[in-house]
Image: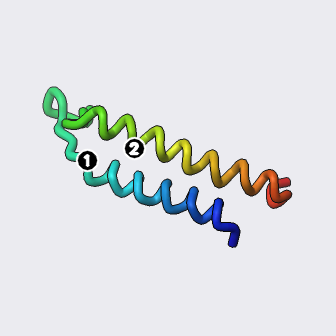
Amino acid sequence: MDFVILLGIIITVLEAIVMMLTPREPMWGYSVYRSKNPAMSALAVFLIILGLAIIIVKAWLNGQLG
């Protein structure tokens, strides 16, 4: 496995865990949720996108994607 793809996987998994651990509270008593730490959530979403981009671009450059 390529180390760059592994790095992208590690970034994506770690930030997915951060998103799961960021506490959320229901708004208006039903299924709409708001994060208690929006800055951390925004950073986690950015890094998840970055990790997926690293994986996809590196696999594309290696010729692993059609």
Mark 1, other Cα within 10 Å: few <14 / some 14–19 / many ≥20: some
Q: Secondary structure at mark 1?
A: loop
Q: What residue is drawn where x is 28% and y is 33%?
A: 38
Residue 15 shown left or right of residue 48 in the figure: left
Q: Which residue is mark 1?
A: 22
Q: Is residue 37 above or below residue 66?
A: above
Relative depth, front residue between 32 and 39: 39
Q: Which residue is mark 2?
A: 44
Q: Residue furthest top?
A: 28
Q: Secondary structure at mark 2?
A: helix
Q: What colour-coding does the image apply?
A: rainbow
Residue 6, located in which quarter of the rendered image? Answer: bottom right
Mark 2, other Cα within 10 Å: few <14 / some 14–19 / many ≥20: many
Q: Quadrant of the C terminus?
A: bottom right
- Mark sitting earlier along the chain (1/2): 1
Q: Is residue 11 in view from this perspective?
A: yes
Q: Amino acid at mark 2?
A: Ala
Residue 51 shown left or right of residue 1 in the figure: left
Residue 1 x, y percent position in the rendering:
69, 72
Q: Amino acid at mark 1?
A: Thr
Q: What residue is drawn where x is 41% and y is 53%?
A: 16
Q: What residue is drawn where x is 55% and y is 44%?
A: 50
Residue 28 x, y percent position in the rendering:
15, 27
**Cβ atoms under marks 1 and 2 closer than 8 Å:** yes
Residue 36, located in which quarter of the rendered image? Answer: top left
Q: Is residue 33 in view from this perspective?
A: no
Residue 51 shown left or right of residue 45 in the figure: right
Q: What residue is drawn where x is 49% and y is 47%?
A: 48
